[in-house]
Image (tube, rainbow, N blue to C red):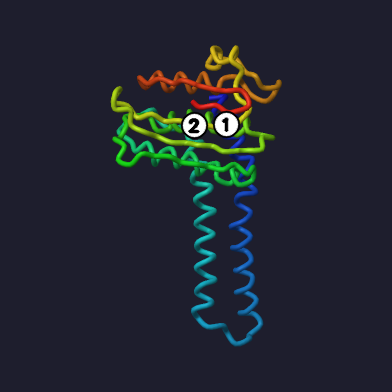
Amino acid sequence: QAEKLSAIGQLVAGVAHELNNPLTSVIGFAQLLESELRSGDPARPAAEVGQDLRRIAEESARAASIVRNRLAFAGRQTAARAPQDVTELVQRVLSLRTYEFRLSSVELVTEFEPWLPPVVIDGSQLQQALLNLILNAERAMRGRTTRRLTVGARLDARSAAVELYVTDTGHGIDHENLGRIFDPFFTTRDVGEGTGLGLSICYGIVRDHGGQIAVTSKVQVGTTF
């Protein structure tokens, strides 16, 4: 729960800026229409006014979607496993970070095989695990010249399982730390920058679902979970 609150805190940090853009458009167009009504000048063609109103509606819907996505992640949901579309679920998590990707110049590459079978999962838990991996990838790429995040899913026919992967072009993980990366409270970050629980929680969620999680990494090249 503490790690989830930490992740929510990072999501909330960018919300004010992310909401500012659509709300600025809403206010601007509303003030323009109000000014025209007050001035008594000949009205513009109805089509132009309608276009402004549509823009207000679209930007309002965009703002509502931003808030709705955050609330959906933050909410305390009951653990219920059901067949789910993994591609849709991953894209939902990625949408939480779209604004931050633009802000940090992170190039997002998605690779989803078509017609993946549904997977029986607790969607809320898997979203939390994925978000932890994505936040870690973003941190690993800070200050790097190339910042590319690749997220995808494919069918592993041999094990009859869907494989998800998150690859970054970050600083990588030292070989001596790879064996401890999923240990509770183990972290390579500075004091105050993490709880050391994120990856151990990912590990627990995946194993609890009967799955496996693994990591490969090369220093100064990148990491794949």
Q: Is residue 131 left or right of residue 185?
A: left
Q: Quadrant of residue 42?
A: bottom right
Q: Which mark identifies residue 108? A: none
Please name the residue that numbered disc 2 is placed on: 166
Residue 30 horizontal/vertical position (percent): 60, 69
Residue sitting at 61 percent across and 38 percent down?
147
Residue sitting at 58 percent across and 32 percent down?
169
Residue 47 horizontal/vertical position (percent): 49, 78
Q: Earlier in the sequence, mark 2 or mark 1?
A: 1
Residue nearer the viewer, 61 or 83: 83
Please name the residue that numbered disc 1 is placed on: 137
- Is mark 2 in CB contact (under 8 Å) with mark 1? yes
Residue nearer the viewer, 51 or 172: 172
Please tell me whether residue 172 is drawn above or below residue 91 in the rendered image.
Answer: above
Residue 14 horizontal/vertical position (percent): 63, 43
Residue sitting at 50 percent across and 21 percent down?
215
Residue sitting at 53 percent across and 59 percent down?
60
Q: SS of the residue at dot 1?
A: helix
Residue nearer the viewer, 109 or 210: 109
Q: Quadrant of residue 220?
A: top right
Give the residue type that dot 2 points to. Answer: Val
Give the residue type that dot 1 points to. Answer: Ala
Q: Residues within 10 Å of mark 1 (few under 14, many from 20)?
A: many
